[in-house]
Image (spheres, rainbow, N blue to C red):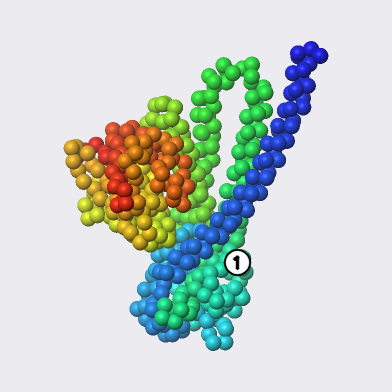
């Protein structure tokens, strides 16, 4: 058999075999990922319910009657304000509520997260006839639960957690969280099909690699142009969706149902998230490939960035009973000079790391100082700290400290590597100070300008 014939046979049989194998593995990973994401979503929602069960105590409910008499009670008003506040920072959750149980076994509302003017509002004492057996068991058995449910308001994925009287050890009520079934399923599938997306990309790469083996030189010359055009084409429709949803939500003449407004809000927030991820990918890719990176210097109100970060990490910090405090050196007028988006990305990363590695029940302190012509933003945790040996390599990239490896937190080890590059682009730097057993302080230093 001639060499050319050998290559032909090889390609004829091996290439389809490889394609079939990739497709099979992709489908298998997709099924596994959907299963894993679903379990993680269930656990996440249940943990959030457990966190709220710690926020609302039996003592808070002890003065309530579970009737419309509570409407003027300071304790009820306080609980109501907390529910409304928590609902605002959890856009994926449609309803948050506290149910009590009568001697007859009927469940009633102590309070919910709806405005009093909402058609979905349930006043104190209103019986909840659609209460499920699981909800009753949560109170009777003092055990958290998760289920798919249906009531007059729609289909839901719901998590419940008991509010326990510490004196008697018995549950006096439950906290419930409802996520629309449609939103839950779409999010699960969206994340779960990522392996399938990667499989499709791999198949495309394999297909084109067969076509361009003799055109490698042209391919490498065209790569930069392709990335630029592709990112532009992706960003355009996303920006259009963002603009359209903003106009709908801001138009006061639109009489939207709450469910419709929530769905549009979800689309808007997911679109912004996709735009941010695309921008992050491109900027980090540009940094890694030493391409020219644009920096838009401006005066940044530091409090606006930090308040947004605190809202985003509220539940994560609450789950560990971690309090994030902002020092009085940072007020509404405090500004630093730099690129807003890159500064935000850096601080998100540093605060996220602090929450991951600080000890439960401790504080994370954020402060600002000016020294040697630099504004120094410090994020201090009270975790196990980092050893001197690991500190030497903390910015190398793709390296995780021994403390991180032994923790339950996953990571790639590139976070500090990337934010250090982002800081240097702005003429600044990241400094990490740590004492084993006492905690870590990460400092973002940006050039000071009046």
Residue that extends furthest to the top in the rendered view of this protein: 2
Q: Does residue 177 lie above or below 428 as drawn?
A: below
- Whether residue 36 appears in this view of the structure is yes
Q: Position of 434 compared to 255: left or right? A: left
Q: Position of residue 298 (x, y in %)?
A: 29, 39
Q: Does residue 274 lie above or below 55 as drawn?
A: above
Mark 1 residue element:
strand
- Whether residue 126 appears in this view of the structure is no
Which residue lies at the image location 53% right of the left edge and 69% below the top edge?
144
Q: Position of 11 compared to 352: left or right? A: right
Q: Quadrant of the N terminus?
A: top right
Foreground pick, 182 / 265: 182
Which residue lies at the image location 42% right of the left edge and 64% below the top edge?
86
Q: Position of residue 413 (x, y in %)?
A: 43, 40
Q: Residues within 10 Å of mark 1 (few under 14, many from 20)?
A: some
Q: Position of residue 70 (x, y in %)?
A: 41, 82
Quarter of the image for residue 178 reads bottom right
Which residue lies at the image location 19% right of the left edge and 43% below the top edge?
370
Q: Which residue in the protein does label 1 denote? A: 147
Which residue lies at the image location 64% right of the left edge and 42% below the top edge?
196
């Amino acid at each position: 058999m001639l060499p050319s014939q050998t290559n032909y046979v090889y390609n004829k049989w091996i290439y389809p075999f490889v394609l079939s194998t990739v497709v099979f593995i992709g489908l298998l990973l997709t099924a596994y990922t959907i299963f894993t994401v679903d379990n993680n979503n269930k656990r996440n929602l249940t943990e959030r319910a457990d966190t709220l069960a710690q926020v609302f105590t039996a003592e808070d409910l002890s003065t309530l009657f579970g009737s419309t008499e509570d409407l003027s009670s300071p304790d009820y008003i306080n609980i109501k304000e907390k529910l409304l506040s928590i609902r605002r920072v959890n856009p994926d959750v449609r309803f948050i509520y506290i149910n009590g149980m009568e001697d007859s076994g009927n469940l009633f509302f102590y309070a919910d997260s709806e405005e009093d003017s909402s058609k979905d509002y349930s006043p104190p004492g209103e019986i909840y006839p659609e209460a499920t057996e699981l909800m009753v068991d949560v109170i009777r058995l003092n055990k958290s639960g998760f289920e798919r449910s249906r009531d007059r308001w729609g289909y839901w994925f719901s998590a419940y957690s008991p509010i326990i009287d510490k004196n008697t050890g018995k549950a006096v009520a439950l906290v419930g969280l409802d996520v629309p079934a449609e939103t839950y399923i779409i999010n699960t599938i969206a994340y779960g099909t990522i392996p399938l997306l990667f499989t499709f990309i791999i198949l495309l790469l394999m297909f084109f690699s067969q076509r361009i083996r003799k055109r490698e030189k042209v391919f490498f010359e065209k790569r930069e142009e392709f990335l630029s055009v592709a990112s532009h084409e992706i960003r355009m429709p996303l920006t259009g969706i963002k603009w359209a949803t903003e106009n709908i939500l801001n138009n006061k003449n639109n009489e939207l149902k709450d469910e419709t407004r929530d769905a549009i809000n979800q689309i808007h927030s997911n679109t912004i998230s996709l735009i941010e991820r695309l921008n992050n990918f491109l900027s980090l890719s540009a940094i890694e490939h030493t391409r020219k990176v644009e920096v838009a210097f401006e005066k940044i109100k530091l409090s606006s960035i930090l308040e947004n970060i605190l809202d985003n990490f509220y539940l994560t910090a609450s789950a560990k009973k971690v309090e994030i405090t902002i020092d009085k050196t940072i007020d509404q007028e405090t500004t630093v000079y730099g690129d807003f988006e890159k500064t935000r990305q850096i601080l998100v990363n540093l605060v996220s790391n602090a929450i991951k590695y600080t000890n439960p029940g401790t504080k994370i302190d954020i402060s600002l100082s000016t020294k040697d012509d630099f504004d120094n933003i410090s994020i201090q945790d009270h975790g196990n700290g980092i050893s001197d040996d690991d500190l030497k390599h903390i910015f190398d990239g793709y390296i995780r400290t021994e403390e991180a490896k032994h923790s339950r937190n996953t990571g790639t080890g590139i976070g500090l590597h990337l934010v250090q590059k982002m800081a240097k682009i702005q003429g600044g730097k990241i400094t990490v100070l740590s004492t084993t057993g006492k905690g870590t302080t990460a400092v973002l230093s940006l050039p000071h300008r009046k």
